[in-house]
Image (cartoon, helix red, strand yellow):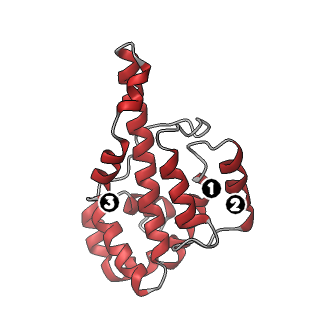
Amino acid sequence: PMNSIQYFYKVLSTPSLVNELRDIAIKEFSVENVLFWENYQILKKMVYRYQMESKKAKDLGNEDLISEYDFEGYYQQIQGYSIPSIDDFSYDANMPVPKEIMPYYTSFYHMFIDYNGPAVVNITNRTIKNIFNEICTFPTVGIYDSAVDEVVELMYYSLYPILLKQNEKHIANTIN
């Protein structure tokens, strides 16, 4: 059904609907949640790109090639336009964050998790502490997954009902 959390995840994988959700979030003073979601998707794409480039380097017999890839250029490129979330690629959440993309994970932390961040999201103290401890000791690519669950739930209960009320037919036509 349209009002289920599973359906909401379909909405979150549709760039045009995420844009509409962001517009609602701005009016509701909770845009940090949608920005968090969009930037989390970018981190996932960075991990995916790292895995692809790493595999390519291994296939060429020179794993050092990965350090020559322009991750900053790729990051700038995917910032500029909406791309659907890439849920169809699987990653090991326990994989250590590669040094090549660690700066993006650190930036994300300072933007959305750190109490003094400019767009800090409302997640539990326990989640914040777990993320902080992990980022200081052994950061993995899944470090923000528990925060994502909390933020998606917040958006589901606060923003999604407004989106549904305003655009139910449009949502159904866009997704189906």
Image quadrant of residue 22? bottom left
At mark 2, the secondary structure is helix
Q: Are marks 3 and 1 in contact (CB under 8 Å)?
A: no
The numbered mark, 1 or 2, whose residue comes first in the sequence reads: 2
**Residue 95: x percent and y percent?**
58, 35
Badge 2 amino acid: Thr
Residue most toward the top? 61
In front: label 3 or label 1: 1
| Residue 43 drawn above or below residue 149 | above
Query: Mark 3 = which residue?
Result: 14
Amino acid beneath label 3: Thr
Mark 3–mark 1 Cα distance, whole angstroms, equals 22 Å
The structure residue drawn at horizontal position 44% and vertical position 69%, both measured from the top left corner, is 34
Label 3, label 2: how many angstroms apart (C-alpha)?
Answer: 27 Å
Q: Amino acid at mark 1?
A: Ser
- Tell which of 65 and 12 is nearer to you: 65
For the C terminus, the quadrant is bottom left
- Asked if the residue at tag 2 contacts the one at tag 1, i.e. Cβ–Cβ closer than 8 Å, the answer is yes
Q: Which residue is mark 2?
A: 127
- Residue 147 visible in the current orientation: yes
Q: Which residue is mark 1?
A: 146
Precedes in sequence: disc 3 or disc 1: 3
